[in-house]
């Protein structure tokens, strides 16, 4: 029985950046320094040396930025659950509150310790001045984050649409070949044709009935094994498939409908053209940071089919792996010598059982 699919986590739901990450903190400090320089230049005159103004402004702005980043780091998991609009509105309010708290604390400390030269403005002017500047800076920053999140969301949705379209191109190709096999068996062996219909029903349930763009290796190998049984009914002893996949974690996830088309191509463009048939070898290995699956088949010297279908399937698989993993070398083809080998390389992203 084919295992049930699990829905993929939608990466487009990350509305806010990871404020706990070192990279985000570096950007915050860098932008803070630039804002401090701009503010120091704006307030610089002959009575206030630039370096002194820059040091006071940098210290004040840096405290605001670091405390705001710390608070957003802690609140981000909760804000993500509220949706994009509320997340940014609440985030804006929280950051504004942090700035006002820091401003009030700074003014009170200078009053208590008598260092009025540090903040020479009146209490109301200093608070209002901080509120106005922080509102503009935070609004611009939150607007940038919102546009960035929408851009990221559109990229993910476009990738998902392309994956669905590519799957729609592969599935009829597989379905037509399977129906031709069953049609030929109904005239020669009705009992085996019935078995093939049951296998095809399992394949349709597993592949056409699911909406997930990724599936586990276990599901992929089960689907390919069912397809092998259908082809075995037609080719008999001419077809042998060696499965060397014990090293692979069966929960690892890859783009759906990947292994079966590779097996189909190996049989259609390799085994069927050999008078005595041959053996398809499916081998899986596990490395430190990636998994590798190769599908190899012997080729008939001087015998070729129209490569259009093969190129379409390989192009679809290559595009889906590039979309999924962002690597142009995730799919490699070696057609030198007497064997045709397709190798998939991808990270061991393991999902739930």
Image (cartoon, grey):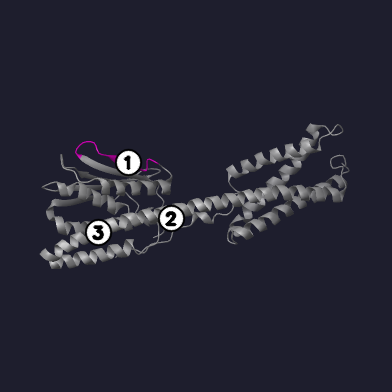
Asked if the residues shown at circle 1 and circle 2 are in contact, with their CB atoms under 8 angstroms apart, the answer is no
Q: Earlier in the sequence, mark 3 or mark 1?
A: 3
Assign a secondary structure to mark 2: helix
- How far across and how far down the image is residue 200, in percent? 25, 63
* Dominant secondary structure, magenta: loop
Q: Which residue is mark 1?
A: 332
Magenta segment includes 336? yes
Left or right: residue 123 compared with residue 150? right
Give the residue pinned by disc 3.
176
Which quadrant, please, contains the N terminus?
bottom left
- In which quadrant of the rendered view does residue 332 lie? top left
In this picture, residue 62 sits left or right of residue 169: right
User: Residue drawn 82% across and 32% down?
Assistant: 49
Residue 3 position in % (x across, y down): 34, 63
Q: Which residues are magenta?
A: 328-338
Front: mark 1 or 2: 2
Q: How dense is the environment of label 1, judged by Cα within 10 Å: few (below 14), some, or many (20 and up)?
A: some
Q: Which residue is mark 2?
A: 161
Q: Earlier in the sequence, mark 2 or mark 3?
A: 2
Q: Give whichever of 182, 9 is nearer the camera.
A: 182
Q: Mark 3 Cα within 10 Å, few/some/many (few <14, many 20+)?
A: few
Is 102 colored magenta in this rendering? no
Image location of residue 63, percent across then percent down: 72, 45
Viewer can see residue 255: no
- In percent of width and height, residue 344 lies at 33, 45
Q: Identify the residue at image location x=84%, y=42%.
A: 119
Displayed quadrant of residue 341: top left
Label 1 SS: strand
């Amino acid at each position: 029985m084919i295992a049930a699919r699990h829905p993929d986590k939608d990466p487009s739901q990350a509305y806010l950046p990871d404020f706990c990450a070192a990279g985000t903190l570096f950007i915050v400090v860098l932008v803070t320094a630039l804002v401090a320089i701009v503010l120091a230049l704006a307030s610089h005159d002959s009575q206030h040396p630039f370096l002194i103004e820059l040091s006071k402004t940098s210290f004040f702005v840096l405290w605001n930025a670091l405390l705001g980043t710390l608070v957003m780091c802690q609140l981000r998991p909760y804000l993500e659950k509220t949706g994009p609009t509320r997340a940014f509105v609440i985030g804006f309010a929280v950051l504004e509150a942090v700035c006002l708290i820091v401003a009030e604390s700074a003014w009170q400390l200078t009053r208590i310790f008598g260092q009025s030269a540090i903040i020479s403005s009146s209490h109301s002017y200093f608070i209002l001045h901080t509120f106005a500047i922080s509102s503009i800076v935070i609004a611009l920053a939150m607007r940038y984050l919102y546009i960035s999140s929408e851009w990221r969301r559109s990229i993910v949705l476009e990738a998902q649409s392309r994956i669905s379209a590519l799957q729609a191109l592969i599935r009829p190709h597989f379905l037509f070949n399977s129906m031709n096999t069953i049609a030929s068996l109904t005239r020669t062996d009705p009992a085996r044709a019935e078995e093939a219909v049951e296998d095809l029903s399992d394949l349709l349930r597993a592949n056409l009935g699911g909406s997930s763009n990724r599936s586990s290796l276990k599901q992929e190998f089960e689907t390919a094994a069912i397809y092998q049984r259908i082809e075995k009914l037609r080719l008999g002893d001419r077809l042998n498939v060696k499965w060397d996949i014990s090293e692979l974690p069966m929960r690892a996830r890859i783009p759906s409908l990947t292994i079966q088309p590779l097996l189909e191509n190996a049989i259609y463009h390799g085994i069927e053209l050999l008078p005595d048939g041959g053996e398809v070898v499916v081998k899986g290995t596990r490395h430190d940071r990636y998994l590798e699956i190769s599908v190899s088949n012997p080729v008939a010297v001087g015998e070729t089919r129209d490569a259009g279908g093969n190129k379409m399937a390989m192009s679809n698989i290559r595009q889906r792996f590039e979309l999924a993993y962002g690597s142009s070398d995730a799919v490699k083809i070696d057609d030198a010598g007497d064997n045709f080998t397709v190798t998939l390389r991808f990270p061991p992203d393991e999902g739930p059982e």
